[in-house]
Image: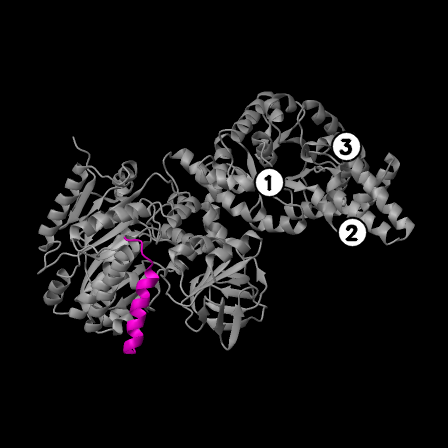
Amino acid sequence: MAVKRVFFFGGGKAEGNRAMKDVLGGKGAGLAEMTTLGVPVPPGFTIGTGACSLYFRTRGRLPQDLKAEISANLAKLERTVGRKLGDPKNPLLLSVRSGAKFSMPGMMDTVLNLGLNDKTVEGLARKSRNPRFAYDSYCRFLMMFSDVVLDLPRSDFERVIAERKRERGVAGDADLAAEALVTVCGELKALVKKSLKKEFPQDPRIQLELARDAVFRSWNNARAVYYRKTNGIPDDIGTAVNVQAMVFGNMGGDCATGVGFTRNPATGAREQYGEYLVNAQGEDVVAGTRTPRPIRDMKKEFPKAFDQLMRITAKLEKHYRDVQDFEFTIENNTLYMLQTRDGKRTAAAAVKIAVDMVKEKLITREEAILRLEPRQIDQLLHPVIDPKARPDVIAKGLPASPGAATGLAVFHADKAVEWATEGKDVILVRKETSPDDIHGMDVARGILTARGGMTSHAAVVARQMGKTCVAGCDTIDVDETTNRFMAGGKVVREGDFLSLNGTTGEVILGKVPLIAPAMTGSFTVLLSWADSVRRLKVRANADTQRDARVARNFGAEGIGLCRTEHMFFVEDRIPIMQAMILARTREDREAALAKLLPMQRDDFKGLYREMKGYPVTIRLLDPPLHEFLPKREELMVEVTKLQLIHADRSIIEEKKRLLARVEELHEFNPMLGLRGCRLGIYYPEITRMQVRAIFEAACDVMREGIRVHPEVMIPLVSMVGEMRAQKEIVVEVAEETMRRHKRKFPYTVGAMIELPRAAITADEIATEAEFFSFGTNDLTQTTFGFSRDDSGKFIQHYMKENILEADVFATLDEGGVGQFVRMGVEKGRSTRPTLKVGICGEHAGDPKSVEFCHGIGLDYVSCSPYMVPIARLAAAQAALREKKPGKGVKKQV
């Protein structure tokens, strides 16, 4: 039995439905479902995603049976609408559009008005009694087909039209009369012939074949590949091709086209949201070449169509039980729906919509939790402009994507990437963005465009990326040639600081102070629902009292990693730390450590006060001592310079002593040298000082009526003997301190598992360790043999070549590093069944890694404070998916 690859929809019936996204793609599934629901949809057919895979496998040579299936469906479409493709008297015109399983707005190609040629355009003019409409459609087709299918620069064609507008003294394309458009069409065809040395294809069936193949090829264009990589969309699913009878929004004043959402995608408010243009085609709305009008204005201009649109879209939202992003066209006052799909939305909108839909009894709490991509809520944790600031507002546009951003103005996507790679914050400024700007938008802090509306490319992509965006700011004059823009009499050049308020649409000259937002309202409600279903605890990595406060505000249930070495890098402590390192005797070292002790004690007090009885895991000194000293090469240069200028002899001698000590401490591979527990074993007085500070601070805070729960973590343990040696010191100092202060409180001593041998011998280490915390950053380094600091040079290349699926320092390598973690958990608990286990690497904030940690039975994850809400949601989703396998997050990409 032949495999069905082409699926028809029309006349109230469809050969597909909403559940067939894998085959029909999102757009095709939506068209089929709307048709079945009785929504007015122009008929057509969908060439399934399998044909795309077949196209690439056969290198573009599609089998005859598939071509025959396409021809049969085309004939059926012709019978349904009563028009034929290529008929010079009553031509059928087609739209040919992409549509993958996951929405990829603007990343792949579309061809509209297909079927026009020198004969059918005349037939369309006679049939419609509107020559201007016919030749406007032909112009559009010639430009789009030449760009998408023939791969000719669109700018060359735009110049032709711009010249005709100048010649006739008109501002917009819509102002060109029919006779001018006839001339333009001739010039566009001549440009094709000049460029390709052959005529523009006149056979509509050849046009259809070429357009179909171009849409397939667009699956692998640079921007689509980049988008898939950024959003975690598989490369092998392919795109469908949707072939549909054209309906026209550009036939005159009783025609229009528009896009909209059933709720506000920026705020989540339940309100009319969208835009439309009279006498236009869909590309005009999203391209930003004309400024559209708000959809509410349709009520006056197209009252019947507006009421019908509101009824249909409300029905679609209820049917899909989610916000719908829809496209429509009005032809001679008759409404047609061209698309519906789950609407992309900002994180703030996603949270509000999910909570509101639970209240409206459209979805359950569990579904609301699963509605959000955990990483998406990172948008809610971005800064906003300090209300105390006095910003210099120089322009105002549309508030296309909320939040605030500040950075250096750049005018080209490549420059944005270049500067961002150098660590600079940038604001991408464009007349209007196109899909080719995707890489620059991805790295920019914010996006500013002079053209376009709330549903323009810039607005839609910025919202999904969580980028601040001000769009359609027509009071700025952008010159992308000289890299500057003018606004309010001021000139902003490339490299000047610029700030954006995406909530108000304000464009601000200079750098403004930003503040972090707080979790309130729907966000707090949703996370409380998440907390009620998750098993995995979420802690934070925090080294300062301020970090601990932020962590608690975001719902952290303790500190899973306090890196004590960070406390020594403060300016007034470095000299004391260096004195300790330079000391030749234990007595001298202990004298320096005695000065550091009260400083460390105060640091730990701050953490205990913020945590108020939640566990605080404090890792003893981990890095090699040379990190606290000047660099060897810099000291050598400094000594040589001092000698050359005959500086004071005592200064030279002091620098030489420092250099000599640096030379003694120099290691060829310091990350595997004298560091971690080895340092504490070699210099036990360092461990004693730190432990004394930990427990004296705990005793002092207990006197304030605050509960404490310190956990002392021994770093870089590789064998049980190391663990035992350090634990003995910890227990001895802890018990002595509590006796001296007449205080008693629970504490534990555990091991940081970050070496393969530690995982392999975890059953032995667990005889001494009361908890394990997997340091997956170093465990990844030592498992792969990758340097975290240097591997960036090749990891991106590995990902591009599909050697690695993801950056292993961002997402846990489950097949290798993850197996060491699993082994460590199982072996550790075989010896100590009550062993508490967590991870404290960067992976703890990665949703996919959090799910793995849940699956292997960890007790907690510990991530950066701003990742805590993400980890809370990810842990809840992991628990729900375990309860109901197959329930995944609805992908909002």
**Picture quadrant where residue 496 is located:** bottom right
**Spot occupied by residue 744 in the image (x, y as percentages of width and height):** 73, 36
> What SS does tag 3 mark?
helix
| Disc number placed over residue 464 in the picture, else none | none
Q: In the picture provided, is 276 more to the left or to the right than 484? A: left
315 relative to 793, above or below: below
The mark closer to the camera, 1 or 3, is 1
Where disc 1 sits, the SS reads loop
Q: Is residue 85 magenta?
A: no
Q: Which percent across, then down, holds residue 638?
A: 80, 49
The colour scheme of the drawn protein is one colour
- Three-letter amino acid code of the residue under disc 1: Asp
Q: What amino acid does circle 3 point to?
A: Glu
For residue 187, say whether it is visible: yes
Is residue 31 or residue 531 the one in the foreground? Answer: 31
Does 298 sit above or below residue 821? below
| Distance (Cα) linking label 1 and label 2 | 31 Å
- Pick whichever of labels 3 and 2 is earlier in the sequence: 2
* Callouts 1 and 3 close, C-beta under 8 Å: no
Report the mark closest to the observer, 1 or 2: 1
Give the numbered dot on residue 735: 3
Q: Which residue is mark 2?
A: 572
Q: Which amino acid type is marked by label 2?
A: Asp
Residue 445 in the image: above or below residue 700: below
Q: Earlier in the sequence, mark 1 or mark 2?
A: 2
Q: CA distance from mark 3 to mark 2?
A: 31 Å
